[in-house]
Image: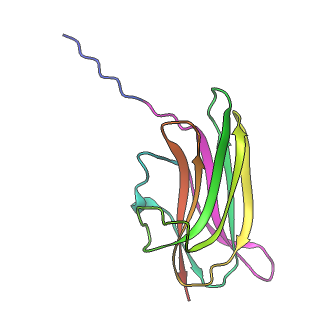
Amino acid sequence: MLILVAKAAQAEHAIIDLRVIRVDPRTGMAKDEASASVLQEPPGENVSQRPQFKAKAGEPLVIQFILTNTYPHGEKTDVRIRYFVVREEKPRQKTVPDLREGVVTQGRFTLNYKPKCRVGARQSFTIKEPGSYLLRLQTENTDSDHEHFSAIDILVEK
């Protein structure tokens, strides 16, 4: 008797390059940065592997990302690309914090997600209060069994 076991392969449908950058306030040049790449939900992430970036309160920072659609089977309409920085209870928290409070900055794009399309942004911001913050970029409404995201913890000291 022959038993075949097929393992479902999940292909990545997005490439994400997410960065948080510390900039020199005098020159505007990048001093250092942390980066993260694509994950998908479900199953979510192994939070122990989420990159962490240390910053000081009031320090100038920049979010930069480029998301590329690698789904080759046609256009997806009304896809949202959302990014935000929000306070979290502790570093590497498993759940995404409620976005009704503690948001430092956020933005979103709604677009027809065509094969090979790219969307990106570069935004300056500061975090005034010490604590742990989540930087996250995510897809929404892709009409798929999973969404893609990328995340970095920002640990802010006095």
Image point 40% across, 56% down: which residue? Answer: 46
Picture coordinates of residue 144, whole percent (x, y): 53, 36
For this orientation, the residue located farthest to the front is 100
Which residue is nearer to you in this view: 108 or 38?
108
For this orientation, the residue located farthest to the left is 1
For this orientation, the residue located farthest to the right is 27
- Left of 70 or right of it: where is 7? left
Picture coordinates of residue 67, whole percent (x, y): 66, 48
Which residue is nearer to you in this view: 145 or 100?
100
- Left of 158 or right of it: where is 62? right
Image point 57% across, 84% down: which residue? Answer: 129
When asked about the image quadrant of residue 48, the answer is: bottom left
Quarter of the rendering occupied by the N terminus: top left
Query: Is residue 37 one of those drawn in magenta?
Result: yes
For this orientation, the residue located farthest to the bottom is 158
Image point 43% across, 53% down: which residue? Answer: 45
- Left of 4 or right of it: where is 63? right
Quarter of the rendering occupied by the C terminus: bottom right
Is the residue 18 above or below the residue 53 in the image?
Answer: above
Picture coordinates of residue 152, whole percent (x, y): 54, 64
Query: Is residue 97 one of those drawn in magenta?
Result: no
Give the mark count. 0
Picture coordinates of residue 60, whole percent (x, y): 70, 78
Image point 79% across, 75% down: which residue? Answer: 28
The colour mode here is rainbow
Part of the protein shown in magenta:
9-38
